[in-house]
C-alpha cells in the first residue's frame, strides 16, 4: 500500500466525485452578511461580556449588587452560633429594657410639658428618667449573668466577645423592629 506515494495508489482507492450542486443549493449555502473584521468581532465580544448600560440600568444593577452583598454579609455576621443563641435568649424574655424606648419617649414628652409649669415637676420627671435607666442597667446585668451560664453550657468553645453590646442593642429595640426578626415568642424555652 502506498500511503505516502499517491502515484502508486490503485484505481479502487480513488475518491468518488462529488455530486454537482444545483443553483438552489448553491444559493442557500452562500453567506448573507460579510465576515466581520477582527476589530468588529472583538468589539461584539466585549459588548456581550460587558454590555454598555444606560445610567438608569447601571444604577439598578449596582443597587441590586449592593443589596445582594449586604444581605450576604448580614447573614454571615448574624449566623454565628453565639449570636443565634443570644437572639433566642433575648427574644424569649420580657424585660424592662424591651419597653425602654416607649417609656423614655413618654418621659421626654412629659418633661417638655411639665418643665414649663414648675421646676419641682421637672425634677420629678428627671428622677423618673434616671430610675428607668437604672432599671435597664440592672436588667441588662442580670440578663448577662444568666446568659453567660447558658452560653457556658451550650457553647463552651465559643468566645463571648462582642455579645454584651449585641444583647444591649437587641434588648433595647422594640420587638417588631429587631433584625433578624425573632424566632421565639416571649416565655418560650430555648
Image: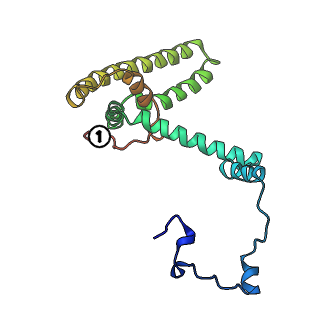
Decide: is 26 above or below 98. Answer: below
99 or 23, which is in the foreground?
Answer: 23
Residue to which mark 1 is pinned: 187
In the rendering, at what x and y percent does residue 90 appear? 35, 33
62 or 104, which is in the foreground?
Answer: 62
Q: Residue at x 54, y 43 (%)?
A: 68
Image quadrant where one finds the C terminus: top left
In the structure shown, which secondary structural element does the residue marked by tag 1 occupy? loop
To which quarter of the image does residue 121 belong?
top right
In the rendering, at what x and y percent does residue 7 appear? 57, 71
Decide: is 164 above or below 63. Answer: above
Q: Residue at x 36, y 37 (%)?
A: 91
Label 1: how many residues lie within 10 Å, few (<14), some (14-19) or many (20+)?
few
In the shown orientation, is residue 123 left or right of residue 18? left
To which quarter of the image does residue 81 belong?
top left
50 or 62, which is in the foreground?
Answer: 50
80 or 131, which is in the foreground?
Answer: 80
What is the count of numbered marks?
1
Residue 179 in view of the camera: no
Decide: is 7 above or below 166. Answer: below
**Extreme front residue here?**
8
In the rendering, at what x and y percent does residue 184 appear? 33, 43
Image quadrant where one finds the N terminus: bottom left
Q: Residue at x 57, y 42 (%)?
A: 67
**Extreme left residue here?**
153
Q: Residue at x 33, y 19 (%)?
A: 141
Amino acid at each position: 500500500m502506498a500511503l505516502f506515494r499517491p502515484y502508486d495508489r490503485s484505481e479502487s482507492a480513488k475518491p468518488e466525485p462529488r455530486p454537482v450542486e444545483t443553483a438552489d443549493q448553491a444559493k442557500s449555502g452562500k453567506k448573507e452578511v460579510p465576515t466581520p473584521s477582527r476589530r468588529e468581532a472583538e468589539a461584539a465580544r466585549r459588548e456581550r461580556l460587558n454590555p454598555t448600560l444606560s445610567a438608569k440600568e447601571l444604577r439598578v444593577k449596582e443597587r441590586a449588587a449592593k443589596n445582594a452583598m449586604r444581605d450576604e454579609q448580614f447573614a454571615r455576621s448574624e449566623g454565628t452560633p453565639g449570636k443565634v443563641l443570644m437572639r433566642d435568649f433575648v427574644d424569649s424574655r420580657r424585660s424592662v429594657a424591651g419597653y425602654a424606648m416607649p417609656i423614655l419617649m413618654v418621659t421626654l414628652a412629659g418633661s417638655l410639658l411639665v418643665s414649663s409649669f414648675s421646676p419641682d415637676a421637672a425634677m420629678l420627671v428627671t428622677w423618673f428618667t434616671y430610675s428607668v435607666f437604672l432599671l435597664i442597667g440592672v436588667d441588662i446585668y442580670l440578663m448577662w449573668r444568666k446568659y453567660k451560664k447558658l452560653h457556658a453550657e451550650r457553647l463552651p468553645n465559643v468566645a463571648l466577645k462582642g455579645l454584651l453590646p449585641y444583647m444591649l442593642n437587641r434588648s433595647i429595640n422594640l420587638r417588631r423592629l429587631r433584625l433578624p426578626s425573632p424566632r421565639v415568642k416571649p416565655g418560650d424555652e430555648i
